[in-house]
Image: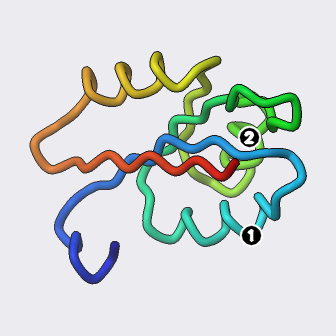
Amino acid sequence: MNKYFRNKKIKIVFGVLRDKDYIKMIDELIKVSDEFITVTPENSRALKAEELKEIIEERGKRAKAFLNIKEAVEYAINNLDYDVLVFVVLSI
């Protein structure tokens, strides 16, 4: 992302299952993202969007939590600026 989108701001819609190495994922994604939009995947093993948001904010990044992917993507699209790219990252 840094190589190809250097002059763009990046928002990441992010959801993950609790049994994945989500801390490592967050630490890598923080390096390239300006803002996170967290979601709770539709899975009994899902990490709740609010918990994911708190972990990201503890690391100094802005985040907003949504209960589902549809609402999160709609929010991301409706709040775009000219120089912003949105990536959806789901680890399920």
Check residue 24 in the rendering and tell me which mark sits there, or answer none: 1
The quadrant in which the N terminus is found is bottom left
Residue 69 position within the rendered picture, expressed as x and y whole percent measured from the top left:
52, 26
Query: Which amino acid, by three-letter code, is at mark 2?
Result: Leu
Which residue is tagged 2?
A: 52
Residue drawn at x 22%, y 70% as measured from the top left: 5
In the rendered image, the residue lying farthest to the bottom is: 3
- Residue 23 location (% of width, % of height): 78, 62
Residue name at image x 59 percent, y 20 percent = 68
Q: Secondary structure at mark 1?
A: helix
Establish if 68 lies above or below 38. above
Q: Earlier in the sequence, mark 2 or mark 1?
A: 1
Q: Is residue 88 above or below residue 39?
A: below
Q: Are marks 2 and 1 in contact (CB under 8 Å)?
A: no
Quadrant housing residue 80: top left
- Above or below for 13 versus 21: above
Residue at position x 62%, y 54% from top?
60
Point out residue 10 in the picture as x, y percentages from the top left corner. Answer: 34, 54
> The residue under label 1 is which amino acid type?
Lys
C-alpha distance separating marks 2 and 1: 13 Å
Element assignment for label 2: helix
